[in-house]
Image: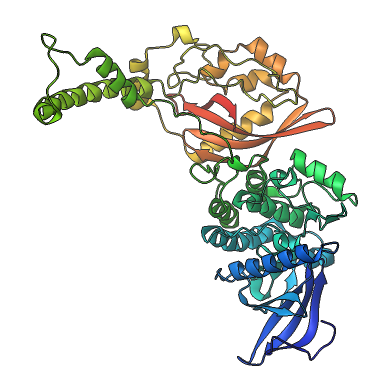
Amino acid sequence: MSAEGRVIAGRYRLQQQIGSGAMGVVWRAVDERLHRTVAVKQLLLQPGYTPEETEEARQRSMREGRIAARLQHQNAIVVFDVAEDEGQPVLVMEYLPSQSLASVLAEQGVLPPLQVAQIGVQVAGALAAAHMAGIVHRDLKPGNVLLGENGMAKITDFGISRAIGDVAVTKSGILAGTPAYLAPEVALGRDPAPASDVFSLGSTLYAAIEGEPPFGIDENAISLLHRVARGQVEPPRQAGPMTPALMQLLRPDPVERPTMAQARDLLQAVVDGRPIPNANPVGGWQRPAAPAPAPAPTPAAQATRVAAAANPPTRVGGATPAPAAQAAPSRGRSRQALLWVVAILVAVLVGVLAANAFGSSGSRSQGEPRRPAAQPVAAPPPEQPTSAAVTTPESETTPAEAPSSEQTTTAAQTTAKQPSQQDIKKTVRKYFSLVPKHLDESWKLLGPSLRAQGQQRYAEFWNSVDDVKVLGDPVVAEPNVIVILQYRKGNNRITEEHVLGMVTTPEGQPLINTDRRA
């Protein structure tokens, strides 16, 4: 495709070259049949293929183009037609007067976090629709995000990178494209999936705010690929309110990432100035090729087994049980009685669980950072149930001295004042502003579960940390608070997402009762 004025597929007349790259050349053209402006992209297959491999890649790119044509979304460039020109596959697409995000970043530098969040909401919306249609982008990066007038953002090149061999090791051993925006699992050789698009979206938005992707820039693509595979993301420094959302999108484990629809909601919360929820992808992702663990038995299931064990089937005088048709009335009565037993046992179990809802025998010590060798800095508190609602900041009540669960529940229901979300956030921020230098004051903001570790052990842990700060705005999801913390020890920094279990004193003072890493 070398000159203006040529006609492709008998109807698309080329007018002006508007872009080029590793994947092909893009022209502005006129569809002479429908009299509209279109974008025509000739896809360039990677060199070094045998004729058979070239034909396979050509067929694959045509197939991917047809798949992309199924997607209709206001924030996705529409594929109108798939054709051929001189043996090369050609895509005919919607024409959008625009600049790519990569071009904007090259000209203007980084963008404000809120503007990036607005771009991200639009891109995530298009990708969510694509995932619902069974389409994975596979090569999301700033060059594939187009910015038009009035803040419009559209994404292009769905699936095409995989079709023509971009971002892949060729036969000659050369890495085509850049791995800077790949997800760690893709760098390790797994097939791209919707969760991989989520990570690539996070990388793209990260680069728009920080000036480079989360794994940096390296001319040695193989070295960069190794860094991507390790999944060690450098926490953003300029993201401000975008930080919690970015860190969720960039989780190394694909199963722990939000779905694309959840990613869109996270970014919309940033735009709206609302707290950033902790997206839980339960039911969204599944870990490939890993057998699902057997679910823990529910209280109702346990009660059913207990009742069944207590009432085994019996024979009268050694006689053979009656046939099913004759035994139906008896089974019906037995089933009804069993249901009553189950209902009673479930009610008892629910009461016990509710009374001890705030106890956390297995929670980690407050602020325990993750270490490379996975060795805990401070052991978890003793595995004893604790009472939460009646503890005051000044009290030193131990689990052994705590009132009974029934008394505690009653007291909490009748006397405890409920703090606002702002009060809870204020307590969390105050606590982390006090540690590690003012431990006597910070100790007063802990609940009984964390106090059970003892002040000496508490001080030993915080003496191993030089500084800690809260990144972004804590998210209240009662009775928990989700917070992103950055620990510093010397020149080393560790960023972690923590879930804090909160309790309230009768006077309405929130306390941090449990602390676990998300």
Q: Is residue 501 left or right of residue 218?
A: left
Q: In the rendered image, which quarter is residue 178 located in?
A: bottom right
Query: Against 132, is 507 above or below?
Result: above
Q: Is residue 182 left or right of residue 339?
A: right
Residue located at (75% from left, 57% from top): 208
Quadrant, the C terminus: top right
The image shows residue 67 at horizontal and vertical percentages of: 59, 67
Residue at the extreme top of the image, as rendered: 400
Residue located at (81% from left, 58% from top): 177
Q: In the rendered image, which quarter is residue 405 located in?
A: top left
Quadrant, the N terminus: bottom right
| Viewer-proximal residue among 39 and 275 | 39
Query: Against 340, is 64 above or below?
Result: below
| Viewer-proximal residue among 518 and 457 | 518
Q: In the rendered image, which quarter is residue 309 located in?
A: top left
The image shows residue 339 at horizontal and vertical percentages of: 20, 26
Residue located at (15% from left, 27% from top): 336
Q: Is residue 232 visible?
A: no
Q: How is the image coloured?
A: rainbow
Query: Against 439, is 49 above or below?
Result: below
The image shows residue 21 at horizontal and vertical percentages of: 82, 68
Q: Is residue 408 left or right of residue 324?
A: right
| Viewer-proximal residue among 377 and 204 | 204
The image shows residue 487 at horizontal and vertical percentages of: 73, 30
Residue at the extreme right of the image, as rendered: 219
Q: How many marks overall?
A: 0
Q: Is residue 469 visible?
A: yes
